[in-house]
Image: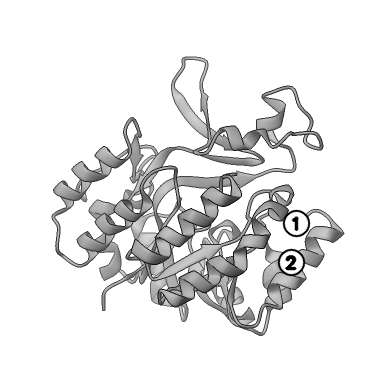
């Protein structure tokens, strides 16, 4: 059975109309099976896009795509907890828990365990499945052997992150605001100035990380095009594409073509590089190597 493609939630602070149009185009043109919608990084962004969510969900459903509503990754106030409860009560739509409190609220009903829950072993996997997780997105640091071991133990669908900047950590502090001498409470939503994340370099001016508001991300884009077929054979049933400020319809088409055997990996890689000029790709974790490395073939 051919693996499915998931479009993860947009992690960046895009303009509401831009985000709405992005999802409309995904609904109409992208060969993905599931689309995640919702604010994961900062609750201050939520009011701007919330009015568009019903129309987006309707458009995606009309296109035959499964919709998942994603939760915040860090819940720090009663207001955010109340919003999480409202999200968890959305009976007609599957919810992705990115904070363990959301998994607890949703326990007893089917939900998706997000990558930020950090499922590294069979015990954690079994606990989440007992709570109701029917799909688990694994953290990016796992090797192919570790992924295969979890897939063999899983009763749920196993999803891994296959494209885009990796969400590494979330903080109570807003790096984007501090970088501009602003406080988090008076941030002026400056994270919107970096629609693909703000690059962070070492003192030697080597790209190191990226900042997205309160979130730390990888500088490199994950690219598992060379590994899709082998990982599917090892039990992975879904591959997640993280939205970036590039043509995600074209990106998803490349991943779909490789999964379907309609395009050689080398050709897909050349086209992906053209869609993401200046981007450095990485897949080292899957090969048990340093995460920033890109390895074309299994060694």
Residue projecting furthest to the top: 204
Give the residue furthest to the right. 78
x and y percent of residue 298 in the render? Answer: 21, 51
User: Which label number is shown at residue 26?
Assistant: none
Dot 2 falls on a residue whose secondary structure is helix
Residue at mark 2: 84
Q: Can you say whether 269 is above or below 98 in the image? A: above
Q: Would you say residue 13 is visible in this rendering?
A: yes
**Which residue is at a point 33% across and 30% down the rendered structure image?**
278
Please give left or right for residue 89 compared with residue 156 in the image: right
Q: Quadrant of the N terminus?
A: bottom left
Secondary element at tag 1: loop
For residue 255, side relative to residue 124 (left or right)? left
Image quarter for residue 263? Answer: bottom left
**CA–CA distance between discs 1 and 2?**
8 Å
- Category of crowding for the residue at label 1, using alpha-carbon neighbours closer than 10 angstroms: few (below 14), some (14–19), many (at least 20): many
Quadrant of residue 189 in the image? top right
- Is 109 situated above or below 274? below
Q: Which residue corresponds to the image point at 61% horizontal and 69% vertical from the top-left? A: 54
User: Residue 23 appears at what percent x and percent y?
Assistant: 48, 59
Q: Is residue 189 left or right of residue 64?
A: right
Give whichever of 166, 92 is nearer the camera. Answer: 92
Residue underneath mark 1: 75
């Amino acid at each position: 059975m051919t693996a499915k493609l998931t479009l993860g939630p947009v992690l960046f602070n895009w303009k509401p109309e831009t985000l709405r149009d992005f999802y409309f185009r995904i609904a109409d043109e992208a060969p993905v099976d599931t689309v995640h919608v919702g604010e994961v990084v900062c609750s201050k962004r939520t009011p701007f896009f919330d009015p568009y969510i019903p129309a987006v969900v309707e458009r995606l459903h009309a296109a035959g795509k499964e919709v998942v509503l994603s939760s915040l990754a860090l819940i720090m106030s009663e207001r955010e907890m109340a919003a999480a409860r409202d999200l968890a009560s959305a009976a007609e739509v599957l919810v992705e828990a990115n904070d363990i409190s959301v998994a607890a609220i949703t326990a007893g009903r089917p939900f998706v365990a997000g990558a930020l829950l950090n499922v590294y072993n069979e015990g954690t996997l079994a606990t989440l499945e007992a709570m109701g997780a029917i799909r688990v997105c694994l953290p990016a640091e796992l090797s192919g052997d570790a992924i295969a071991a979890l897939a063999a133990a899983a009763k749920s669908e196993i999803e891994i992150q296959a494209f885009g900047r990796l969400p590494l950590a979330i903080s109570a502090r807003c790096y984007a605001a501090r970088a501009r001498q602003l406080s988090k409470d008076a941030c002026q939503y400056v994270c919107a100035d970096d629609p693909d994340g703000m690059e962070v370099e070492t003192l030697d001016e080597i790209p190191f990380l990226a900042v997205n508001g309160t979130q730390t991300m990888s500088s490199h884009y994950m690219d598992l095009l060379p590994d899709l077929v082998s990982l599917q054979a090892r039990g992975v049933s879904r591959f997640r594409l993280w939205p970036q400020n590039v043509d995600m319809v074209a990106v998803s088409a490349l991943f779909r073509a490789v999964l379907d055997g309609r395009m050689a990996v080398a050709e897909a890689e050349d086209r992906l590089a053209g869609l993401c000029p200046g981007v450095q790709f990485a897949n080292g974790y899957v090969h048990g190597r340093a995460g920033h490395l890109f390895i074309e073939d299994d060694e």
